[in-house]
Image (cartoon, rainbow, N blue to C red):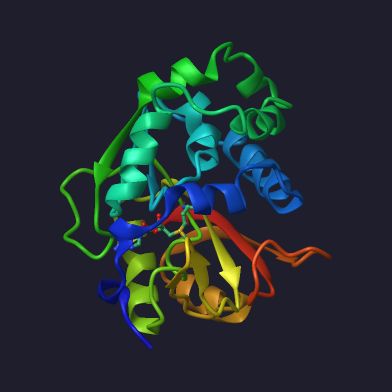
Amino acid sequence: MAGNLAYDWDAFDAQDYLAHNYADLHDEDRRILEIVREFLCAQAFDADAWGVDVGTGTNLYPALSMLPFCGRISLLEISKANRRWLTGQLRGYSGNWDGFWQVLAEHEAYRVIDRPRDRLSQAASVQRWDIFGSVPDRRWDLGTMFFVAESITTFRNEFTTALAKFCSLLKPGAPFVMTFMENSKGYEVGGRRFPAFGIDLVNLREEMWGLGNGMEFYRFGVGPEPLRDGYSGMILVHGYVK
Ligand SMILES: C[S@@+](CC[C@H](N)C(=O)[O-])C[C@H]1O[C@@H](n2cnc3c(N)ncnc32)[C@H](O)[C@@H]1O
């Protein structure tokens, strides 16, 4: 059992994590993209809305999901290795993300963006961020946090804090989307172990109760060829910050 500080996030092997999880579009990601796309397309945003993705790692699809709706997108990440990878990708992201974009571009709101690479380069910026740090004065208009709160610690209190801190980054009423590994026992990246706090839908509903309004929860079981060992599915929640 160990908390977030016990792990060397700067040594997170960005290439290995990317190769394992996002080199190709998997069915789970397609489902997630479709749900997020439909949720975001149903919202009304100001022209200068500012989005945030927390613990971006080597996953660009939360940011791509926000692209039509946000003039600016902050990618907040604690790991130096992941920030370096992200900064490189913002100069022109790799071809593997085209398949993810195509799912989004099934909707007109995304399809009208001719050059998503250029648009992401212009809109997004990478910032060092510790989710457990102090809450800034400013608040974002839309937020995503994918596979972070349950995948950065084995401690329940840190999981709870990460959820609350994420919500406190957003304006009251702001739409948000979070995803989680269900019952994860931790994961290996580049030969190093990283932690998880095992959660299920019941725990998550309890934890989120005081944080959001209008929440909808989705659960997908693992397919016949799971991406990783030691988890039973994925959970997505979207809603509006209280
Ligand atoms: C399992 S990865 C998820 C990455 C990505 N969001 C995804 O969907 O695949 C967990 C991420 O949380 C980041 N992280 C770990 N501790 C953090 C902290 N205290 N504050 C912010 N991010 C943190 C890690 O560097 C890593 O990028």
Quadrant in which the N terminus appears:
bottom left
**Is 69 rendered above or below residue 3?**
above
Q: Quadrant of residue 185?
A: bottom right
Residue situated furthest bottom in the rendering = 1
Residue drawn at x 49%, y 59% as measured from the top left: 213
Q: Residue at x 42, y 28 (%)?
A: 70
Which residue sits at x=45%, y=18%? 119
Please state if 76 lies on the left or on the right of 227 as rendered. left
| Residue 237: % across, % down | 57, 59
Q: Nearer the viewer, residue 189 or 154?
A: 189
Q: Residue furthest right?
A: 224
Left or right: where does residue 28 sit relative to residue 205? right
Dividing the image into 4 quarters, which one contains the C terminus?
bottom left
Determine the residue positioned at 62% across, 13% down.
112
Q: Is residue 76 above or below residue 160?
A: above
Residue 144 image point, x, y percent: 46, 48
How many numbered marks, from 0 up? Answer: 0
The answer to whether residue 51 is visible is no
Instruction: Check the image and report above or below for 90 versus 28.
Output: above
Query: Which residue is the extreme one toward the front?
Result: 191
Q: Nearer the viewer, residue 230 or 168?
A: 230
Q: Is residue 58 left or right of residue 33?
A: left
Q: Quadrant of ligand 1?
A: bottom left
Expressed as whole percent of the image width and height from the top left, the position of residue 97 reads 60, 32
Q: Is residue 187 left or right of residue 111?
A: left
Residue 226 in sight: yes
Q: Residue 123 sits in which quadrant?
A: top left
Percent coordinates x, y for residue 218 in the rendering? 68, 62
